[in-house]
Image (cartoon, helix red, strand yellow):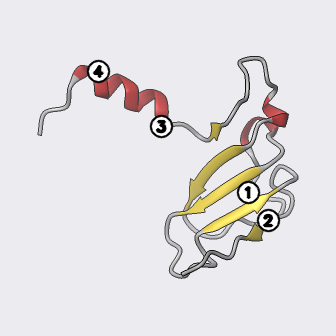
Amino acid sequence: MAVSPFSHRIRKGIAAVGVAIRGSATEADASSPMIISGSGAPVNGTTAAPNGAGTVLYIRTNGTSSDEVLYISRDGGANWAAAVLAS
């Protein structure tokens, strides 16, 4: 399948360490929630938020049950808690 030059440029911009959700263009990284992903559960104090973000959602790419898919940290990655999702 051929990839259009437009979609190829857009995908490069989206593939990033984390995605910050800003309310305005001038909002600081530390006050912007961020979404990151990875394999395995995040480790307290080790899986840190990029750019000093405060609240972070971590999507686990290899989770096998509803309590192993989404994690949240309100302190930039110092402490993580599993979000319990309805199955």
Residue under the image location 30 percent in, 27 percent down: 8
Q: Amino acid at mark 2?
A: Trp
**Nearer-N-terminus badge (2/1):** 1
Q: Report if the CB atoms under discs 2 and 1 are less than 8 Å apart.
A: yes
Point out the tag, 3 or 2, that comes first from the N-terminus: 3
Contact? badges 4 and 3 (CB < 8 Å): no
- Residue 74, by quadrant, is bottom right
Q: Position of residue 43 (x, y in %)?
A: 75, 66
Sequence order check: which comes first, mark 3 or mark 1? 3
Categorize mark 1 by other alpha carbons within 10 Å: few (<14), some (14-19), many (20+): some
Do the residues bearing badges 3 and 1 touch, measured as CB atoms within 8 Å?
Answer: no
Callout 1 amino acid: Thr
Report crowding for label 2: few under 14, some 14 to 19, many 20 or more residues within 10 A (C-alpha): many
Q: Position of residue 41 (x, y in %)?
A: 65, 70
Q: Is residue 25 above or below residue 35?
A: above
Query: Label 2's element?
Result: loop
Would residue 69 appear left or right of 42 to someone viewing this image?
Answer: left
Residue position for label 3:
15
- Sooner in the amino-acid sequence: mark 4 or mark 3: 4
Residue visible at 50% across and 64% down in the picture: 61
- Measure the C-alpha gap from mark 2 to mark 1: 9 Å
Residue of label 1? 47
Which residue corresponds to mark 2?
Answer: 80
Q: Residues within 10 Å of mark 4 (few under 14, many from 20)?
A: few
Alpha carbon of mark 3 to alpha carbon of mark 2: how far? 24 Å
In the rendered structure, the answer to whether residue 16 lies left or right of residue 54 reads: left
Task: Give the image location of residue 30, x and y in percent.
Answer: 84, 35
